[in-house]
Image (spheres, rainbow, N blue to C red):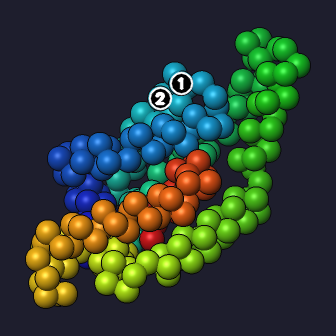
Amino acid sequence: MAIYSILAEKIRGGDAEAFKEMYMQHFHKVRYYAMQYLNNTEEAKDIAQEVFFELWNGRQNINPSLSITSYLLTIARNKCLNTLRSNLNSKKYESYMANRKANLYYSALLNHSAETLISSELENKIRSSIDKLPAKTKEVFLLSRKSELPYIKIAEKMGVSVKMVEYRMIQALRFLRTQLKDYLYAIVVIAVLSSW
């Protein structure tokens, strides 16, 4: 079972330590996602906190077989929509430009087809970039990121040292960072890599 599935299962059972670990690993992603739409640091932080509050309170409904990142971002998306809806009607968004910007963010959140298109384009770019990696480096990367194996297990499986696994991962991440530098903003927002 993947590490996030194990954490999700533990959280569903009321394990506070597992929840804390999930919080530490995902809070910044959720906050960043909210920030892209709300353009307000405090509101984005509040949304992220509400998302994890809702995760804990509704922990019995967690499905460990589904992507926890997608689950968290879906909750965040709904909360961003509510906040934008409220902001569009409030006095602090009276100016034309602020209303226009809030409307654009609101439309972007509602537009599932645009998100799907960007996600699809990103996945294609990520896959093609991974395919360009040298064979052994690609194998290490996929075993680590897709199969979620720890370095020691990858080393055993490939018959190499842990140091070699670490070296190949560094090479892979360096290469992918270069290949995907124009897509980093969208990657963080949609969190494509985390659901691989």
Residue 87 picture quarter? top right
Category of crowding for the residue at label 1, using alpha-carbon neighbours closer than 10 angstroms: few (below 14), some (14–19), many (at least 20): some
Q: Residue at x 76, y 59 (%)?
A: 114
Kindly tell me whether residue 74 is visible in this rendering.
no
Which amino acid does the dot numbered 1 rest on? Thr
Above-or-below relation of 168 to 95: below
Above or below, 117 against 49 in this view is: below
> Percent position (x, y) of residue 49?
42, 33
Residue 31 percent across, percent down from the top left: 48, 37
Camera-nearest residue between 84 and 15: 84
Give the image location of residue 144, x and y in percent: 29, 72
Q: Picture coordinates of residue 55 (x, y %)?
A: 39, 47
Residue 195 seen in this snapshot? yes
Q: Amino acid at mark 2?
A: Lys
Closest to the camera, between mark 2 and mark 1, is: 1
Label 1, secondary structure: give it: helix
Looking at the image, residue 86 lies above or below residue 109: above
Q: Quadrant of the C terminus?
A: bottom left
Find disc 1 in the rendering and name its residue: 41
Secondary element type, mark 2: helix
- What residue is shown with label 2? 45
